[in-house]
Amino acid sequence: MLLFAAATAILAGQGCAIDVVRSPQVPVAAVTDQKAAQQIPARLMPVPGTVSPQLRTMIAGGPSPIWNAHPKSTEEWRTWVQQRAEGAVRGLPALRQKLEVTVEPSVIAGVKVFTVAPRVTSPENLRRVLVHVHGGGYVLNPGEAGTSEAILMAGFGHFKVVSIDYRMPPDHPYPAALDDAMAVYREVVKSTDPSRVAIFGTSTGGGLALAMVLRAKREGLPLPAAVAPGTPWSDMTKTGDSYFTNEMVDNVLVSHDGWLGDAAALYANGHDLKDPLLSPVYGDLAGFPPTLLTTGTRDLFLSNTVRVTASCAMPGSWQTSWCSRACPMRSTCSTPTRRRPGNISPICGPSSTAISHGDTARASRPHQAAGPVA
């Protein structure tokens, strides 16, 4: 499981630091300039033979059947979300049993949470807490449905995880999710040394994790020891190369023009989508704690991830980037294995190429790495 490897490496003070240099700046409007667009001939996308059999099966499975859903009313959104949640919850008892993990609902600072704990916590993790914010476009995975990633992290990593069941639209648009996440974070760092706290999440959870650190900086709160945004939804506008190059290639999200774009508008509720607390890539990411960013070559959010890496490549910052070959969104961070899968490649060190595409970033020299986390 890549995110487990990420958190373990960061909290142990391991991993590779990279300095990512921005490409020449291109006006945002140019990214979607139809007059300058290239005409790409229709072509087949073969299932790669360089990845695991499980991933090949996933890639060959075709696009998500819900990608182009467009709920219209508040009631339609509620029904659609509930149907998805019921399906997500069904597999959780078996997952908890297999990984020997307990999940206990509780309330912290007035916010619903789930405390996810392994049967045996690793000695080095006894005083550590991971704060988890789930994915789902700010609309999906309410309640227990949002705990699967936390279960994986607790089970494989032997960490205590606090998974936040933040409020979501249609009833609770921005900034409800961020307010809830921050309320829990404030309480966690009151009882746990911030040097022993990390924040992680995938997709929307990755974007929210970044927004949490931005907000903590604004409020003068102690920053976490590390943050691990998996394939973060760091730009809620359709800006970035892979929104186009990986459209219909990522078979999880598939396209911004499906339910995803509707969810962005629903959550933002009239706020500017380029507000850094909605789209953290537009924020000041200098001075971030050690940051682990993950993505996949078929990920719709590949550009989101690369642009964040470039934005936080500032003196004193420290990041490690991982790119999963052929992975769409979600599978980059939820491969159930106790060791790094063969299709995961670390991107690090002098002169190693990060990702070569329209929003490319280049690894050139390591930053001064932060010291080991206690």
Image (cartoon, rainbow, N blue to C red):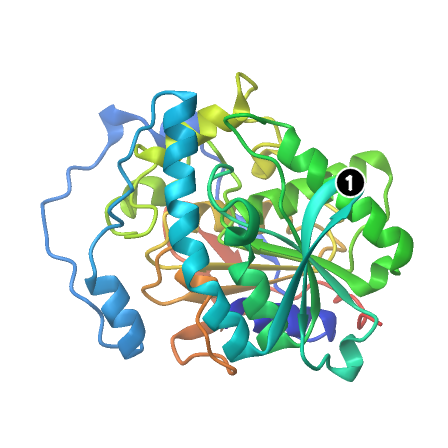
Please name whichever residue, 312 or 124, is drawn nearer the observer in this view of the structure.
124
Please name whichever residue, 85 or 67, is drawn nearer the observer in this view of the structure.
85
Measured from the top left, where is residue 76 in percent x and y?
A: 36, 27
Above or below 370: residue 221: above
Q: Residue at image x 61%, y 63%?
A: 18
Label 1: which secondary element: helix
Please name whichever residue, 24 or 340, is drawn nearer the observer in this view of the structure.
340
Measured from the top left, where is residue 288 in percent x and y?
A: 73, 50
Q: Quadrant of the C terminus?
A: bottom right
Measured from the top left, where is residue 214 in percent x and y?
A: 72, 40
Q: Residue at image x 22%, y 76%?
A: 49
Q: Quadrant of the rendered structure where residue 259 is?
A: top left
Q: Residue at image x 87%, y 39%?
A: 220
Left or right: 371, with 274 as reference point: right
| Residue marked by disc 1 | 183
Measured from the top left, where is residue 141 in percent x and y?
A: 49, 46
Instruction: Looking at this view, name the residue that lies furthest to the top.
Output: 270
Could you tell me if residue 226 is visible in this image?
Answer: no
Above or below 324: residue 262: above
Badge 1: residue crowd in 10 Å (few <14, some 14–19, many ≥20):
some
Q: Residue at image x 73%, y 75%?
A: 12
Above or below 27: residue 319: below
Disc 1 residue type?
Ala
Left or right: 124, with 154 as reference point: right
